Amino acid sequence: MTPISVTDLAPGDTAGTVPVLSHVARAAGHELRNSLNALVVNLEVVRSRSSEPAVQPFLEQSVRQSEESVRLAAAAIALLNLVVGALGSDGLLRYRLTDDGGIRIEATPGESERAGRALKALADRADLSVDASESSVILRVRADSEAR
């Protein structure tokens, strides 16, 4: 496999960047999930072996937060994969703005469903709504988020 650099591309030719970005997104996601999952496992071991009652609440909170970090990382990775997957061979993102201020990102069926599920964890914390269909994901800022 020959690496592609930006200087190898002719002006306006971005078709080669999509596979590179897809590879980077998959590799980064894999490594990030591995690291976070190892953190969760190690915290669980420390929590289960700790005999100090005063430390238990902190360890339990650490386990919960690390598990939430895994879910949020998965959401960020899903968004990255969704965007990379929606890049056309011309390098342009396939999206449409919705009448209610959202953005509809066109995607392949499997990618839109995966991204929709993963992005729900982010949506709950970031005042977003996520609607996934077979061919797209729609992201909207929730109307009530301005009041917070």
Image (spheres, helix red, strand yellow):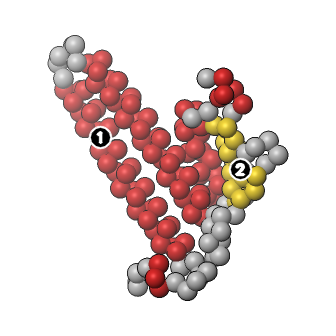
Residue closest to the eye, 111 or 11? 11
Badge 1 local density, few (<14 within 10 Å), some, or many (20+)?
some
The residue tagged with tag 1: helix, strand or loop?
helix
Q: Residue at x 17, y 16 (%)?
A: 52
The residue tagged with tag 2: helix, strand or loop?
strand
Judge left or right: residue 12 versus residue 44: right
Residue closest to the eye, 11 or 97? 11
Relative to 60, is 117 above or below? below
Q: Amino acid at mark 1?
A: Leu
Say the numbered circle drawn on residue 103. 2
Residue 128: image quadrant is top right
**On-image quarter of the C terminus:** top right
Q: Position of residue 21 (x, y in %)?
A: 49, 68
Relative to 48, is 20 above or below? below
Q: CA distance from mark 2 to mark 1?
A: 34 Å
Q: Amino acid at mark 2?
A: Ile
Furthest toward the front, the residue is: 11
Badge 2 local density, few (<14 within 10 Å), some, or many (20+)?
some
Q: Residue at x 63, y 76 (%)?
A: 89
Q: Position of residue 66 (x, y in %)?
A: 36, 35
**On-image quarter of the N terminus:** bottom left
Q: Residue at x 47, y 78 (%)?
A: 6
Residue closest to the eye, 56 or 82? 82
Q: Position of residue 23 (x, y in %)?
A: 45, 68
Q: Residue at x 29, y 44 (%)?
A: 38
Q: Earlier in the sequence, mark 2 or mark 1?
A: 1
Say the numbered circle drawn on residue 39. 1
Q: Is residue 134 visible?
A: no
- Count every numbered label the image shows and give the total: 2
Q: Position of residue 63 (x, y in %)?
A: 34, 30
Which label sits in the foreground, 2 or 1? 2
